[in-house]
Image (cartoon, grey):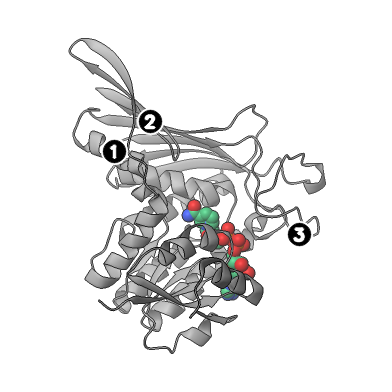
Amino acid sequence: MDKINIGIIGCGTICNSAHAPNYKNNEKANVKYLVDLKPEKAEAVKTKFGFSDAQIFTDYKQILNDKTLDAVSVCVPNYLHHQISCDCMSAGLDVLCEKPIAISYAQARNMQETADKYSRILNIGVVNRFDVYVNELKRIADSGRLGEIYHVYCSFRNHRSIPGMGGWFTTKNMSGGGVLIDWGVHFIDLILYVLNNPSIISVSGKTYCELGKNMREYVFENMWAGPPDYKGTYNVDDFVTAFIRTDGATVSLNGAWAQNIVNEDMTIEFLGSKGGVKLRYRNDFDLTVCENGKIETITQHCEPSDAFTLEIDSFLDSIKTRNKSRANIDNVIKSQIIMDAIYKSSEKNSEIVLR
Ligand SMILES: NC(=O)c1ccc[n+]([C@@H]2O[C@H](COP(=O)([O-])OP(=O)(O)OC[C@H]3O[C@@H](n4cnc5c(N)ncnc54)[C@H](O)[C@@H]3O)[C@@H](O)[C@H]2O)c1
């Protein structure tokens, strides 16, 4: 079987932790190009993962004319997802674009239309859809054991975790937003996946830029995307609260990159008429059921597996089969509609009705 030739565009954190190692370990893939504005970052990936045949470029347009190239991973800052993904698809390439899809629903919709126009696979890095606990919880919910799920309570609040203050993550025109678009997208997507993609009726939310707005006054313990750049910009949300009505369950969420609380709280609770689940994000869950006149809680254990490995494998499968997987843009675009509506609701101080 011929290997699938891959280009990785953007050789930063997520390339190093997820895309490069999983292409390297997948016998279906051959990494042919590594692209980064900073060639030393592409060189470092080439050396670290032993991509001895990979060529290095600083401009992704230089790889688009290679007819033997099949697909790319787009691992650049959010504001570049739209342009780079569309250019790659127009050139005949399949795309795995990191989350969030883009910095607005309008851009995301245009990416979906471009995928349709050029008959391309466009997957998004919705890695939780490949998480073993999320899938076990979805199986239980789909089996009816929880009864009707009427509410989802979601918290993605950390004590101190603003990424790369002053860099692209905290600059709205590069990131599209703060904690909502960076972390919230993962949680909203996970919830929509478990609830089988309900229709969204309305959204109400408020975003806050509080702890980081005076960058020099922000007291932190670590900063995982590089040291603060005090000459840079911080104009994004570090806290969000929202309420979402669907044609099924309602959803309430609170998220914070940083908050004056003692411990982080990264949990999602699915409340059903017969049972409930408390999922510890990227971890296990407690299942509480009322059965045979008794209330019982068990902690679910699953065989560990790497969700990023499954995400990359699913992308390579879709390239071969042309089937749209659970990570295809058609199945995940609603999270961008919800995030746009939360930002709009916050700006207008009113509920946004979507249906
Ligand atoms: N799925 C996840 O859990 C997860 C985790 C982290 C990041 N991400 C997403 O991955 C994307 C990248 O995040 P990151 O943390 O790796 O960022 P990063 O800043 O570490 O890496 C981005 C890289 O892109 C390069 N770059 C910038 N502009 C470029 C261009 N025009 N052409 C080529 N390269 C360019 C930069 O030099 C940098 O090396 C973001 O969209 C982010 O939201 C996803």
Camera sees residue 106:
no
Question: In this rendering, is residue 289 above or below 230?
Answer: above
Q: Relative to the observer, which residue lies in front, 69 or 250? A: 69
Residue 118 is situated, as x and y percent measured from the top left of the image, at: 32, 79
Of the image marks 3 and 2, the number of the one nearer the N terminus: 3
**Comes first in the chain, label 3 or label 1:** 1
> What's the CA distance linking mark 1 and mark 2?
10 Å
| Left or right: 218 as drawn, with respect to 304 | right
Q: Assess mark 3: CB under 8 A from ligand 1? A: no
Query: Amino acid under label 1?
Result: Glu
Mark 3 neighbour class, 10 Å CA radius: few under 14, some 14 to 19, many 20 or more: some
Badge 1 marks a residue whose secondary structure is helix
Q: Residue at x 37, y 61 (%)?
A: 312
Q: Distance between the Cα atoms at labels 3 and 1?
A: 43 Å
User: Which residue has dot 2 on it?
Assistant: 285
| Disc 2 residue crowd, few under 14, some 14–19, many 20+, Cα 10 Å | many
Q: Quadrant of ligand 1?
A: bottom right
Q: Residue 253 bears which disc, if any?
A: none
Query: Which residue: 29% across, 71% down?
Result: 319
The residue at the point 36 percent across, 35 percent down is: 250
Amino acid at dot 2: Phe
In the image, residue 4 sits, relative to residue 260, either above or below, namely: below
Nearer to me, 101 or 16: 16
Q: Which mark is residue 232?
A: 3
Tags 1 and 2 touching, CB below 8 Å: yes
| Residue 136's disc number | 1
Q: Crowding at label 1, few (<14), some or many (≥20) Cα neighbours within 10 Å?
A: some
